[in-house]
Amino acid sequence: MRIGAIVLARSNFGRWPEKLKANLGGKPIIERVIERLVKVKGFDEIILSTTDYPEDKWLMNLAGSYGIQFTTGPPDDRGLRYYEAVMEYDLDYFMPWPANWPFAEVELLEEVISSAREKPSYMGYRYMRGMPDGLCVGLASKQVIEFYKDSGDDQEMWWRPSKDKHLILHDWQDVDLRNKYLINLNIAYPLEVALYNKMIDYLGFFPECYNDIKRAYMEMKTL
């Protein structure tokens, strides 16, 4: 069984074109994402999927500098880019990982990968329910992306009719942080980078897990 992580990344984000280069604790966001994924035990491949546009050449070079693979494809067809990466590297399962999710929890990712290797009969494996945005962990099978590669909606593959064949490992419940304080662990706006940089400065290190972020946020609120 071959399992890979696929990071979709491109320069021309409509709302914030320079997002992936934004400084997060002293390094660009995209480097934080890659560095966290390469710590995970169990991936056969980590693949950065970008476009063949000239402005994305730096992403191909970045992948090479970290010793991971890259593929190129159409900028606006996410499903097809996943599919092409899965097929090119012959993956049985893949973990889709957005390029603006720098706070992956290594242990959670490893647990999902281990579940797939131990019980390889499901279409997908998820840690999704109730988790903060930016931490949702899941694996999808090659069959799932083959089914949905032409849909134009990569999110749809998580809610396909065969979702009863997905293994839900745990429900995640942290009502305080998710609902009351509305903390997103994916980064969409400059203000969020500024907030997380303040947290990193407060902690004195880059957060290794969700509880680091929660502690910094809660303690900073009392200052």
Image (cartoon, rainbow, N blue to C red):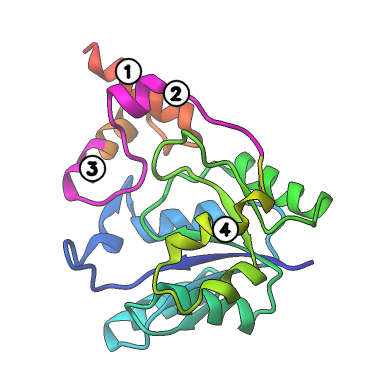
Going by the numbered disc 1, the residue's amino acid type is Met
Please indicate, yes or no, whether residue 221 appears anywhere in the rendered image: yes
Q: Earlier in the sequence, mark 2 or mark 4?
A: 4
How dense is the environment of label 3, judged by Cα within 10 Å: few (below 14), some, or many (20 and up)?
some
Amino acid type assigned to the residue bearing label 2 in the image: Asp
Q: Residues within 10 Å of mark 1 (few under 14, many from 20)?
A: few
Q: Which residues are magenta?
A: 169-195
Mark 3: secondary structure: helix
Q: Which mark is residue 174?
A: 2
Of residue 83 and residue 55, the one placed in the foreground of this image is 83
Identify the element where label 2 is drawn: loop
Q: Earlier in the sequence, mark 3 or mark 2?
A: 2
- Residue 61 vs 219, above or below: the answer is below
| Residue at (42% x, 39% y) in the render | 206
Alpha carbon distance from label 1 to label 3? 16 Å
Which numbered dot is residue 218? 1
Q: Which residue was labeled with disc 4?
A: 161
Using the numbered discs, state the Cα–Cα distance from disc 3 to disc 4 in whole angstroms. 35 Å
Per the rendering, the mark at residue 184 is none
Q: Nearer the viewer, residue 145 or 64?
A: 145
Q: Residues within 10 Å of mark 4 (few under 14, many from 20)?
A: few
Quick one: SS at disc 1? helix
Left or right: where does residue 104 sit relative to residue 119?
left
Given this view, does label 2 or label 4 mark the residue nearer the observer?
A: 4
Q: Quarter of the image holding residue 93?
A: bottom right
In the rendered structure, which disc, 3 or 4, sits on the residue that comes first in sequence? Answer: 4
Disc 3: which residue: 192
